[in-house]
Image: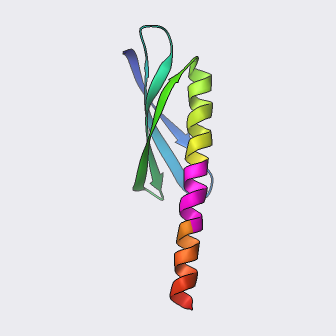
Amino acid sequence: MYAAQQLLVELPDGWSSRIDIKQTSNGRYAGVAELNLQGLKWGVLVFMQQPSLDAALARVRLRASQFARERLSLLDAESRMLLD
């Protein structure tokens, strides 16, 4: 892989992602996205090769949003359990 770059992607509800993305020798894009909630690391997504940089960023945004919604849902369920 070559042409490594680092991007920051803002996500809803206080989430952000730092993406380390590389272009492969066949021109596709793959990488790793570190997910943070209000500055604290919450997880890492690995995304497989995508045909373009735009497709790779769209994939990361989709998967990161799904991850964030799931985590917020779990936190909400846990807080409700603590209040009962």
Q: Which residues are magenta?
A: 66-73
- The image quadrant where one finds the N terminus is top left
Q: Is 18 located above or below residue 14 in the figure?
A: above
Horizontally, residue 57 falls left or right of residue 41, namely: right
Please state the horizontal and vertical placement of residue 25, each as a whole percent of the image: 41, 8
Horizontally, residue 15 falls left or right of residue 1, namely: right
Q: Is residue 71 magenta?
A: yes
- The image quadrant where one finds the C terminus is bottom right
Please state the horizontal and vertical placement of residue 42, each as a whole percent of the image: 42, 55
Please state the horizontal and vertical placement of residue 34, each as a whole percent of the image: 42, 44
For the point 56% across and 21% down, which residue is it?
A: 53
For the point 60% across and 39% down, which residue is it?
A: 61
For the point 58% across and 17% down, which residue is it?
A: 51
The quarter of the picture where residue 32 lies is top left
Furthest-bottom residue in view? 84
In this view of the protein, which residue sits in the foreground, 12 or 71? 71
For the point 48% across and 28% down, which residue is it?
A: 48
